[in-house]
Image: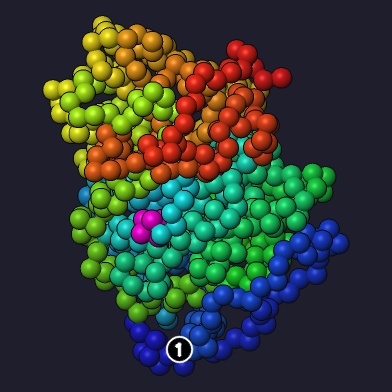
Amino acid sequence: MNLKNLSILLAALPLAACAHGPAGEAMAAWAPEESQAIAAWPVRSPTTVQDAEVEAHIRAIVAGMTLEQKIGQMTQPDIRYITPDQVREHYIGTILNGGGAWPSMDKHASVADWAALADAYAHASTSTDMPVQIPILWGIDAVHGNNNVYGATLFPHNIGLGAAHDPELIERIGAATARSVRATGISWAFAPTLAVAENQRWGRAYESYSSDPAEVARNGAALVRGLQGDMVGEGAVLATAKHFVGDGGTYLGIDQGETRTSADYLARVHGAGYYATLDAHVQSVMVSYSSWTMDGRIPFGKMHGDKALVTGVLKQSLGFDGLVVSDWNAIEQVPGCSVDHCPQAINAGVDIFMVPEKWQGFIANTIADVREGRVPMARIDDAVTRILRVKFRLGLFDRPTSASRYTGDASAISDRPLAQEAVRKSVVLLKNDNGTLPLAPGKRVLVVGAAADSFADQSGGWSITWQGDAIDNGDFPNGETLLAGMQRVFGSANVTYSPDAHGVDPARFDVVVAVLSETPHAEMKGDVRWPAPLSHSASYPGDAALLARVSGKGAPVVTVLYSGRTVYTTDLLNQSDAFVAAFLPGTEAGAMADLMAGRNGLDFSGRLSFAWPNTPCISGGEPAGEALFPRNYGLSYRAGKKTGKLREAESVQSCP
Ligand code: GLC
């Protein structure tokens, strides 16, 4: 339905009088400490223009909606727990598929299967008994390509993209990701993460571009531009600035933990990505699970209940007029709330509630909250207004998401050349003594380590499944492992593969490539909790044993590490002649082989986006005294230097 037809229909509906603040919410009165917190942030004009005709339509639509229909718009179930018919019956405005959810729960679901399911939900959402049909919005964690989808190209995770120092590349990755998402009939990506990770113990450190707020800002804005384009194009999707705010600053890197900073630091460091992505016209913001304690002594509590920051800062001071979405069941962490009931979060300024399973309880409880005066109707109207505004801006009222040339196009989820470029730019050469690299053609290469031939290890979390677990190479029909890349570049006859390095004599080869890896993880499952040592050998003794089996045995060793963080590896560096920090390169890890051969003049250009620690007991914040290699460090063939033997920390079983 286009705006013209809509205006004819809406003319019949009664207009409601709505009092709105500068960015569409009722102005609030703040306690002194709240005013102090808010004052630390800049006051900015909205970066988006509100179209008067659209706003009038929105007001008329909202005025014609029942409370049930309004709350339905604010509710976001997971596809595992809601059918298209229920979407219609309950006026649901958005859905999501969390990591590890696919059409018919088939992890090999085709692009056509995804598009068909999206169409079923879209059709249901516009088949209600409402006077004006409101199209549904489906959100997905496309955080390094459309990573839930079988056959999709998965790009390097953000920690690697940060090391590329190439926002233009990230913008192209955003555009490719948007096309890949639209191929599945979906039009909302829960990316970019704008965390400024300050402690590599954090299980989500790899979702952060850098410990440098300016890098996070540049790269986050680039991804938003790539994803959203002009917002209405056939290859555009809604982007999400997440997780507001301070997710990367939690104490000891505890996921969903407590960020203890001054208001000024929160605004300057952890807010950096939000100014830039607002300038890039990001239209959705996801709230952080974490909490904030001002100056380490004034608790503002969980972000999902923090009206001063979500409404006072984000919506009023920063002028954000898009929609705010909660994180997965995050409202249950707000004191006094439960998984399906949280008036505090609604009043704080959250507009859409990611209540994957208990969504029916949420609807019933929220209707009661409004009827019993715990949530003012003005707040509900503001939330629905924001949701409709974003849907108008996405063009959903003019044409269904499925009306894109990418819908159902399996070729649109693949962009191997772009991913290969990203891999080559994102890996960092930390050591290259005695000219070990580049490897000349014809070299006899022994490759060891199961990770050398593991799409799961090279892709990390958020890959097919939430944790990147319970998958194998059969789940990745499109891409190249490092082993396959080595075989391609050096010739299979010159490459011998031994996953465990047993029964092979390194001395019979010209070089050994040892591929070590973290176990893929996402969110809290990746935390390395204090006082455990943040050391790869301590966490993965099998890797340490593998390297010991080939190091100093008659052939130089090139170690390649897949990790979602910078991590203490001085012991491993000392057993290696060359060392590549590959981070989590995604489905095209094989592109490293071209780099390691220096083919066609290829050279390393990656530079660390986080400091590389010299201790397993990092304190957080990357003090210079704890850096083996500082942020922006990285060698190349043209600018190499001898690393030599490094001083190792005492054998650390536990940090003090
Ligand atoms: C997760 C993550 C968030 C993600 C959401 C939906 O818990 O915190 O980044 O977008 O849930 O999967």
Q: Nearer the viewer, residue 373 or 431?
A: 431
Magenta span: 169-174
Inspect the image, locate mark 1, and give the three-letter code of the amino acid beneath it: Leu
Residue at 35% from the left image edge and 48% from the top image edge: 422
Q: Residue at x 13, y 22 (%)?
A: 493
Q: Is residue 307 left or right of residue 421?
A: right
Return the x and y of residue 131 as percentages of the image width and height: 42, 81
**Residue sitting at 32 percent across and 58 percent down?**
176
Where 530 sits versus 480, above or below?
Answer: above
User: Can residue 77 be seen in this snapshot?
Assistant: no
Q: Quadrant of the N terminus?
A: bottom left
The residue closer to the viewer here, 203 or 590, is 590
Residue 270 visible within the image: yes
Image quadrant assignment for residue 605: top left
Q: Is residue 170 magenta?
A: yes
Q: Horizontal and vertical percent for residue 23?
A: 63, 76
In front: 10, or 555?
555
**Residue at 83% across, 58% down:** 33
Q: Look at the numbered disc 1 and give the secondary structure of its residue.
A: helix
Quadrant in which the C terminus appears? top right
515 vs 8: above or below: above
Q: Position of residue 517 (x, y in %)?
A: 41, 27
Q: What predominant SS class does the magenta segment belong to?
A: helix
In the depicted structure, whether residue 531 falls above or below residue 285: above
Q: Quadrant of residue 173?
A: bottom left
Reading the image, the residue beneath label 1 is 10
Give the farthest residue toward the left: 493
Q: Is residue 395 above or below residue 601?
A: below
